[in-house]
Structure formats: structure tokens, C-alpha cells
Image (cartoon, rainbow, N blue to C red):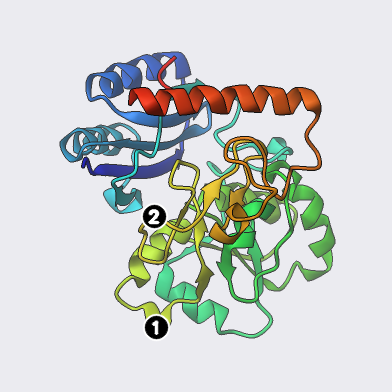
Amino acid sequence: MNTFKIIGFYKFLKISSCQKTKDIIDSLLVKQKILGTIILAKEGINGMLAGDNDSINQVIDFIVNNFNIDFSEIKISYTQKKPFHRLRIKIKDEIISLGNSKSSDPNKKVGTYINSNEWNNLLNEKDVILIDTRNYYESKIGKFKNSIVPNLINFKHFPDFVEKLTLHKNKKIAMYCTGGIRCEKASSYMLNLGFKNVYQLQGGIIKYLEDMEKNKEKSKWEGECFVFDNRVSVNQDLSVGNYIMCHACNEPLSIEETKLESYKEGIHCPKCVDSLSSKQLLRLKERQKQVELSRLRGTSHIGKK
């Protein structure tokens, strides 16, 4: 069975020509048979890629040499489960959208980075406001103890949540997300609003779990960590977790939820069964039929477009 090496990375930096950069990256990744997603914008690059060890190592060399990314900033994990179906390189206005982008520029100002051990010490302090900047479905399957969970449908709604914190501009604010990128945008935004002491977990949850792997007794993480690939979630040792994805509503499901009558693979789950229209159900049933036929043929229903 093949082992896939997965890397996650991002960098806020000025990119003068996204199209030229895309063409160069595409040529390399196609040659190395890399799968995953890269988002390019004038403000930087955000990517999550997978491939065999040698191919990914060549990609890492390219990223480090061309985007001012330190090797230590790249999150690395391994899995035997194919994490992506295809390669996508997209050009967007932002590499992560906050919804109020004019008030946030990580290329100019961000919160204070703190490593995993410093993070643990900070969380032991009193009166620290600990904020999970991820989407609500991510927080449901795992979070740091005593986190404030804004229950965001999308990161674009984070500014609405911050409005509720305006009386706490002098308190210590500690924020975290999966890999760090959302916290950079969020911390820049909050600093521009006048918050004085904003901290962010360097490298995000993934780097924290990697650092705590040999010191699990010190870990303050509870549950699993949602990831945006076919693994769906990872355990505290970064192995594939126990959740699957509902392809109707794109929410993670526990093993217990998949045993309920309201769960039908690829069609609906307990969270969306009552909200799907007849037209949507027909479309999802047909899609699942094609997926099952592909399984019988030993091929993938979803592939490179």
C-alpha cells in the first residue's frame, strides 16, 4: 500500500504576478504527480499537497527557496489513505477570506507567535481569552479546553464575533486554528481594531499535536482535529481519525452517527436528512450510484478535470 506524504504551508508575501507563479508551480506539481490544492493571491500562497516522499521533498525545496518559507513552518504528516483526488491551483483575491479584508493585512502587522510550550504556559494564566477561529463543525470534534467557540459558519463571519469583544481590548487574546493562517488574518484584524495583546499558536493545531506527540501528558488538546482532505480528521498522534464526511452537507460524522437509520452513505446523514429537497436527493443518489460502480471497476469516480 502506498504511503502519502502530506504537507501544509502558507505565507503572506507580495506576489506580483499570480498567473506567472501559477504556471511555474503547475509545471512542477504535474511533473511530480502531486495532488492537492494551492491558492494564490497578491497577498500570498496557501497550500496543502500530497505525493510520494521524493516528489514532495522536491516540492518542499521549491517552496522554501521561492516563497521565503522556513522548513520548520511546513506541517508534515503521513497517511496510507489517498488524501486528495486531483490537483487544483486557484487564483483568488485572498488566500483566506476574512470578509473585511481592508482591515487586515498580515504583511504589515500580526499578533505575537508563540510555540507549543509557550502556548501551554499562556493557557495556564488567568483571564486569558482563548478563541477557536475555525468553523463550527471543526470545533465540534475537538478543541482546546476552555475555548470560546464562536460557532462560525464561515471565517468571513469572524468580524461579527469580534464586535462582542470590544470591552476586552486590554486583555490577553489567544487564538488558534488548524495551521495558523486564519489566526494571522484574525490577529491583524484585531490589532487594527485596537486590541493590545493578541497571541496566536504558531503552526496551528497540527504543529502543536506534532510537538506534543512525545509529551501527550502535557497536551491541552481534547478530541480530534478536522482536516480539509479525505482523512477528515486526525488523532493526537496525527494518524487518521475516526470521522467520515457526509457528502451531502460536508459535515464530519462519528462512527455512532453512521450507524443511525438516518445515515445513507453519500446521500444524507442525521444532520441533513430533513433539509434536503427531492431534487437534491435524486442528484445525490445518482452520484452515489456512480461512486459504487467506480468501486466495482476499481477506479475513482472523482479525478483530475
272 or 232, which is in the foreground?
272
Q: Residues within 10 Å of mark 2 (few under 14, many from 20)?
A: many
Residue 94: x and y, percent? 59, 31
Q: Amino acid at mark 2?
A: Val
Whether residue 142 is visible to the viewer of this picture, yes or no, is yes
Q: Count the marks: how many?
A: 2
Q: Could you tell whether 283 is left or right of 226 in the image?
A: right
Q: Earlier in the sequence, mark 2 or mark 1?
A: 1
Q: Give the residue at x 84% y 61%.
A: 164
Q: Which of the two residues, 256 or 25, is positioned nearer the viewer here?
A: 256
Residue 208 horizontal/vertical position (percent):
42, 65
Which residue corresponds to mark 2? 240
In space, the residues marked 2 and 1 are separated at their CA atoms by 21 Å
Q: Residues within 10 Å of mark 1 (few under 14, many from 20)?
A: few
Q: Tag 1: residue type?
A: Glu
Which residue is drawn at the image coordinates 34% and 48% (left, top)? 74
Question: Which mark is drawn over residue 217?
Answer: 1
Residue 252: where, in percent of width, then height?
59, 50
